[in-house]
Amino acid sequence: MLNATYKTVSSSTHPPVHSHRLALLQAFDDTGIVMTRDRSLQILNEYLNCLERELTGSRGTPDVGKVQEMLLEISQFVRSGKARVVPHEYSRLLGRLSGIYSRGLSENFKSAFCRTAADYADVVEAVSRENTSYDYSKIVGQLLYFMGQLFESRKGSWVVIYEHLGSMSDSIRVVQLLKLEYLLEVQRWAEEGVANLFQIRKDLQRKIASLDEAVDGVLAEIAERRQEMASCKSRWLDRCGGRILNMDVWILKSEIDALRKKVKKLIQERDGSLAINDLIDVNILEFEGKLREVRRKYHIKMVHAAA
């Protein structure tokens, strides 16, 4: 019966997943309705079938929002404590789910897998509380990969995966290893605000662009004043031969000097922002290297452990 429970079934033999949502809502409320184990497994199975069809089917671009919604509902169902599923049945769920997401390491749907990886991590964390005996080494490796991909793609959800990994049950051996040997450096960077670097850099780049526009604007003003001053001088020479000081020329010259000082100040401010932006770029690249190093060391450790 259990083998049949987690067997992939064609979409023609299964109703749409939304037909099971009412049952989930009833399970979450306080009406006293108790969901049977068989019904729980049926619902989880249909959710997995729908996830697989959405992420790996041939119907075109996956609906990322739909996938995220289904993964959230699975994690909520598991966390509710009303799923009535025993640990080894959760092992089948994890095996099926990790098999689906393993395709995100090689197929063209990588972006869809990456964009929903944080929600996948949420399900994994929820199940880890119910089943600590499962071998999570493959799943942790997948999540480290997606975490690195998200950071390199400048997606803030990488930190959500990090938080889910850090919240998995400490009684799982591979999680203990991850936290003690590999995530400490990531934690230090996270505590120092690495998750904010992209927004800081984005704000800086806006500021730099604004300063560039301001410099261009002031330079245009200077050009206009210089042209106006040249015309004024020419008219004044024609009228009196330049024997008397022209106050209009003097005023324009003073305005040009003030504008030059303004340009100098704006350029200094822009250069300071550029220097900070360059430093942030260095920090981002360094952290990308740290994430790749964590994944590489983790996989080497897993290979040696399996040998």
Image (spheres, rainbow, N blue to C red):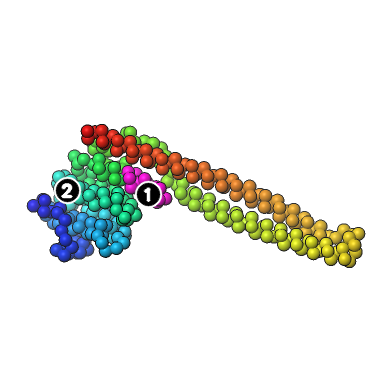
Q: Dot 2 surroundings within 10 Å: few (below 14), some, or many (20 or more)?
A: some
Pinpoint residue 223: horizontal percent, then vertical percent.
Answer: 71, 60
Residue drawn at (20%, 50%) of the image: 96
Point out the image quarter for the C terminus.
Answer: top left
Number of numbered discs present?
2
Amino acid marked by disc 2:
Arg
Quick one: SS at disc 2?
A: helix
For the magenta stretch, what is the residue range? 144-164
Whether residue 205 is visible, yes or no, is yes
Pinpoint residue 161: horizontal percent, then vertical percent.
Answer: 33, 46
Quarter of the view holding residue 306: top left
Mark 2 = which residue? 92
Q: Is residue 59 above or below residue 97?
A: below
Pinpoint residue 128: horizontal percent, then vertical percent.
Answer: 23, 44
Mark 1 = which residue? 150
Q: Earlier in the sequence, mark 2 or mark 1?
A: 2
26 or 243: which is nearer to us?
243
In the rendered image, residue 149 lying in the magenta stretch gets the answer yes
